Image: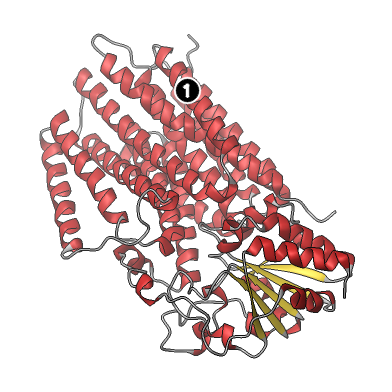
Amino acid sequence: MLELSADLYAAFYLLATILFVFGLKGLSSPKTALRGNASAMAGMILAVVVTLIHPSVKSYTWIIAGLGAGALIGTVLALKIQMTAMPQLVAALHSFVGLAAVLVAAGTLMIHLHEGEVSGVLLAELMIGSAIGAVTFTGSIIAFGKLQGLVGSNPVVYKGQHFINLLIGLVIIGGSVQFVMSPDLITFAWITALSLLIGVLLIIPIGGADMPVVVSMLNSYSGWAASATGFTLNNHLLIATGALVGSSGAILSYIMCRAMNRSFFSVILGGFGAEASAVATGGPAKGVKSAAAEDAAFLLENSTKVIVIPGYGMAVAQAQHALKELQAALEEKGVELKYAIHPVAGRMPGHMNVLLAEADIPYDSVFEMDEINSEFSSADVSLVIGANDVVNPDAKNDKASPLFGMPILDVYKSRQIFVIKRSMKPGYAGVDNSLFYYPNCALVFGDAKEVIEKLASALKGGGH
Amino acid sequence: MSPLMIGIYVFVLACFIGYHVIWGVTPALHTPLMAVTNAISAIVVVGAIIVAGFSSENSTAIEIIGFFAVMMASINIFGGFVVTNRMLAMFKKKK
């Protein structure tokens, strides 16, 4: 077997770390992103190959079986998954990293017990690694269940919830101290089991509306789990890579919280959206104007600048492909069309951009909130499709509104607004939208996909 | 410096690098970012390989644990990179 010096291993691992950093850096623009992904892949291949020739690896049967099975399952999952289901896939993948971290910690502990060499520092690191991995594992499974609709998306709250969590947390810490002093597999197992439980308890009180934050947060945890594993193995590649992923998830959580005007702390404590169902009422309210698709088409045809505001409702209705048709029809008539994306438009950060890209909508006509907000006052028509809270002017004007302070798309400034809606049902936050009562706003009732198809065909027919 | 302290140095400095690199990622690519970080957090495969490749007397239990760890990490590596590639290939400029 090829023998490399410890320094040479470290050098290869350093190179892999650098490739990961370049991979992330590539995502600063869609032009360089594919190259970035290739760089990250190269880093991973290097890391795996170098580890395979490490002298402590003595048999390959289980490794090859594991790599092969994982490659098959992972590739099939990635190729089959629908873009609307991306948050579920990401949550599922987070849970696998968590589980892998727990298993690595357990295996490493058994190896060390087998060889009879354990230090207090190592035991503490192993326990922390296993605990973070366990929380990531079960937390992600609950998030997956909520996103997939297997578990109710309503927050589960009960009396003394935070006190119980705190109590379990203290038992985990106490047990860990005992484990470091007298290590055995049983103690390790029950502390890991309690960590699995706390992962469940931490996520169940968080409502469906906060899922973008939860997915980002678990992304962060999976990174910290990798870092903790790195400490147990004294491997700087794992420590550094885990830190990169951990900070990435933390930043995304922060961005999501800011976009929803929620503090990270209140998201974690949960309970948000519990009262939403109680407030929701159906039926058109007084003072709301409705318009037929034909009227909307007429106005669209005679405008020079149209801004489309897609929300998750658009993706649910599978309307993005029809939207591409509408864009083509409008551009043929010389109408400029832009898309405005609120950071929480989808169910995870950047989700809406992917959904639009999938429908072949070029990324240079898609704009972030900060880029496009100044343009609404010069827009002839704003077309809101399946979005609600993110265009509610109450967030700016009404101090009593629960949305107050949340950054919104300034749709109300445009000359004419059309909102495509199924019914008068309020958005996620369960709040009435004052935009619907504006004199320049009209509602087009119907299924998003059907309405957009109608608009596109009316424009193509040129019946007016 | 103890190995733990060196590890902490690496960890803290890498957090700073992460902080600066991630703020440079365009918000349009935040979903692919999450998918690719998912793939690279599967770097725990390094630890998994060492566990699965441990061969000694009565070490079957360790190797089986290692097998599952390698498989979980491998699902992430392939799933994460393939899906990121799929998403990024869809981002096109106006013709």
In the image, taking residue A220 as reference, residue B64 lies left or right, namely left
In the image, taking residue A440 as reference, residue B34 lies left or right, namely left
Q: Residue at x 10, y 40 (%)?
A: A178
Which residue is denoted by mark 1 in the rendering? Answer: A69
Instruction: Pick whichever, A52 or A294, lies toward us.
Output: A294
User: Chain letter of disc 1?
Assistant: A
Residue A6 in percent (x, y) is at 44, 24
Residue A22 in percent (x, y) is at 61, 44
Q: Residues within 10 Å of mark 1 (few under 14, many from 20)?
A: some
Residue A322 in percent (x, y) is at 72, 58
Question: For the residue labelled by badge 1, is the local secondary structure a helix, a strand or a loop?
Answer: helix
Q: Quadrant of the C terminus of chain A?
A: bottom right
Q: Is residue A335 above or below residue A324?
A: below
How many marks overall? 1
Q: Residue at x 33, y 72 (%)?
A: A275
Instruction: Pick whichever, A407 or A171, lies toward us.
Output: A407
In terms of image quadrants, where is residue A230? top left
| Residue B12 visible in rendering | no
Q: Residue at x 37, y 25 (%)?
A: B68
Q: Is residue A378 above or below residue B40?
A: below
Q: Amino acid at mark 1?
A: Ala
| Residue A347 visible in rendering | yes
Q: Residue at x 51, y 32 (%)?
A: A74
